[in-house]
Image (cartoon, helix red, strand yellow):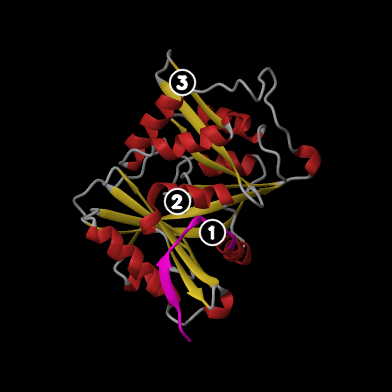
Amino acid sequence: MSIRFRTMTVADIPGGMRLKHAAGWNQTVADWRRFLDADAEGTFVAEFESRIVGTVATITYEHQIAWIGMMLVDPEFRRRGIGEGLMRRALDTLQAREVPVIGLDATPMGQPLYERLGFVATSKLHRWSLDRAPSETATNVPGETAATPAIDLTAMCERDRAAFGADRSPLIRSFFQEHPERVLSVSSPESSSHAAVIARRGTASDHLAAWMAETQHHAASVLDRALARTSQPGVIVDVPADHPWAGAILTERGFRIARNLTRMYVGDSGSPIAAVDPGVCAILGPEFG
């Protein structure tokens, strides 16, 4: 069997979407384009007889932290070294650029491969899931319109940078440009607090991402406003397993834990890796960090 490894192009996105659907993942065509726009030379496919049978994508933030995502292999082609071949190309590219820290969020299936490649587990994530009847979905918060959401995008990007350890504002702004009504970011001058969430639209579920708040009260408030802007029956959110109160908020709203992920890193331990931050209730996404 002859497998060809090469960089990914826009023409390969349908092949990537086929693998994504087979895995039951939630990313969209726009998410693939985000990777290609950010780093076309760091995103790879495995090809067999003109058929895309594997993918991996990378994105680098401020040359401080790189993230690896979209590690997918066609079920018919697993256990043939394709996943390792893709990962080695991604790692070789990032290490040649001397990116000091490389991270990913591993599924249980992928974790043994990443451990062999030198990644070290640092924390756990819970994916929480909510299933609603269509009648329970909504598009607007009372008193607001989709065209005029409450938003402080600069404060949101600054808060995310402090928590993550590198600037991800181009990525966050891309979500705002795609669906401005689904990005909520609210600051309170009286208390110097800030709350934010991005209600990303996926192919199967809405994804509540970059959920940040300094207090439980503000976290619940901004989450409810984001839920009111979702429209799909399914909603997912990825929360640090040891977060002190995010799970309680989600449980009250009918969410349940659907699966677990493991956050892993390889690289210079002296470089900035964000520590556990109680103000971060949910990550941006396993594919983006």
In percent of width and height, residue 159 lies at: 38, 31
The amino acid pointed to by label 1 is: Ala
- Tell me the residue at 44%/52% (across/down): 36
In percent of width and height, residue 72 lies at: 50, 66
Which residue is tagged 2? 35
Crowd class of label 2 (few under 14; some 14 to 19; many from 20; radius 10 Å): many
Disc on res. 11: 1
Magenta stretch, residue numbers: 1-14
Label 2 – label 3 distance at C-alpha: 30 Å
Residue 77 appears anywhere in the view: yes
Residue 200 in the image: above or below residue 19: above
Which badge, 1 or 3, comes first in the chain's sequence?
A: 1
Crowd class of label 3 (few under 14; some 14 to 19; many from 20; radius 10 Å): some
Q: Residue furthest left?
A: 270
The amino acid pointed to by label 3 is: Ser
Which label lies toward us, 1 or 3?
A: 1
Which badge, 2 or 1, comes first in the chain's sequence?
A: 1
Q: Secondary structure at mark 1?
A: helix
Position of 7 with respect to 234 (left or right) is left
Residue 112 appears anywhere in the view: no
- Tell me the residue at 57%/30% (across/down): 180
The amino acid pointed to by label 2 is: Phe
Residue 13 within the magenta-colored segment of the rendering: yes
- Tell me the residue at 29%/42% (across/down): 62
Residue 63 in the image: above or below residue 156: below
Which label lies toward us, 2 or 3?
A: 2
Q: Quadrant of residue 13?
A: bottom right
